Image (tube, rainbow, N blue to C red):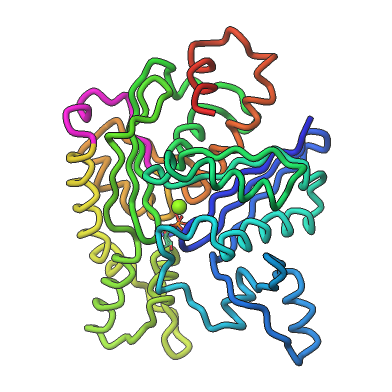
Amino acid sequence: MKTFIAVDLGRSAAKVVAYDGASDKREMLLYPSAVIPAKSLSDEGARARAMSETVTVNSKEYFFGDTAIRQGHDDLLGGLRDDWFGTDHHRALFLGGLKKLTDAGMPDVESALIIVGLPSTMYASHKAQLANVLSALVPQATIKVMPQALGPYFALAFDEKGQETDKIEADGMYGAIEVGQYTTDYALVIEGDPIDDAYGSCSGMSKVAASLQRILQQKDYSVTLAEATQALATKQIKNFGKVVDVSTEVATAVEPLAEEIYMKSREVFGSHLRKLDKIVLAGGGAGLIAPRLSSEWGTLELVPNERFAVADGFLRYALATGTISQQQGKGALWGRLFRIA
Ligand SMILES: Nc1ncnc2c1ncn2[C@@H]1O[C@H](COP(=O)(O)OP(=O)(O)O)[C@@H](O)[C@H]1O
Ligand SMILES: [Mg+2]
């Protein structure tokens, strides 16, 4: 069996999941979506560390991930533009993920089946272009570009081995909400087909981090946006050697975004909302937003390992395509899913 790789290059962090059937080896990687031109470093230790996060694109060397943040003081807070797909930075992060996998001992990375997501709004217009750009970087690999919103859907439809679960019905209607760093993205999946008209987006977690920063400022804790972002997950900040619990402040900071996401869901899903079999919630912010949405809809389902849901879902889908011959006739879902590819 081939090596399968799924890459989700988010605006805050890259998520990469890979599986090799022969050795039953699985890898999950997360690194910041930061890229800067490589510099010559005087310290030998720093140089050795940077080597593992250096890639060459168009004959130029780039640092990516934590090295780019450390060496470039890039804390990512400016965010990336929507149309960064196909830029050298995007390529560097993609190649960086493959490099990290190779370094982690994943076999046959260069000849793998690689699935890459595109924001649903750009899928139709950029799909072919992105596949060409990435194929040129790894000519031996098979590249598939898929709408990002299908990742969480696949994460529920298949288990870790790519076998169909009973969580998704082939003829069902599903809403998908992905709470990312700068945007929250929506999709509707009817009988395995993503519906273009339902795509939309609203604010993401950066809004919550900014609001947490303001709330803490009023209590005389002056934290950077990067610290506030971290505190969303840890519910703690450090203050002169003491750890301060900020879970109450986080809960307050999340309210406006939770409300915005709820209102936008009603707009995006419109008259379908009532008929949805499930509303699938994913993305790094999903855990914080879930309580507000589940109080409205019993159909809400938080995808496990939510930040990895897109990459993990794509990988499960890739495994499903690899095992299709053993599963034929298992349901109408198959035929539909393979139309998407
Ligand atoms: N465990 C967590 N608890 C709360 N918030 C989190 C957690 N993990 C991540 N986040 C928040 O979710 C944001 C977005 O995550 P992610 O889905 O990776 O975004 P993107 O795909 O846009 O890069 C993070 O920057 C952070 O603010
Ligand atoms: Mg994302």
> Is residue 234 shown in magenta?
no
- In the picture, the quarter occupied by the N terminus is top right
Quarter of the rendering containing residue 92:
bottom right
Above or below, comparing residue 170 to residue 116 in the picture? above
Q: Residue 252, how many percent across, how many down?
A: 23, 65
Q: Residue at x 61, y 50 (%)?
A: 133
Q: Image point 61% across, 61% down: which residue?
A: 93
Which quadrant contains ligand 1? bottom left
Q: Is residue 8 left or right of residue 152?
A: right
Q: Nearer the viewer, residue 65 or 118?
A: 118
Q: Quadrant of the C terminus?
A: top right
Question: Residue 53 sits in which quadrant?
Answer: bottom right
Furthest residue to the top? 329
Give the image location of residue 129, x and y in percent.
54, 46
Residue at 38% x, 55% y is 285
Q: From the viewer's perspective, is residue 275 above or below residue 297?
A: above
- Judge left or right: residue 148 versus residue 137: left
Span highlighted in magenta in the image:
269-281
Q: Position of residue 261 (x, y in %)?
A: 24, 49
Left or right: 70, with 262 as reference point: right
Count of numbered circles on the image: 0
Say whether residue 337 is left or right of residue 204: right
Within the magenta stretch, is there residue 275? Answer: yes
Q: Nearer the viewer, residue 240 or 269?
A: 269
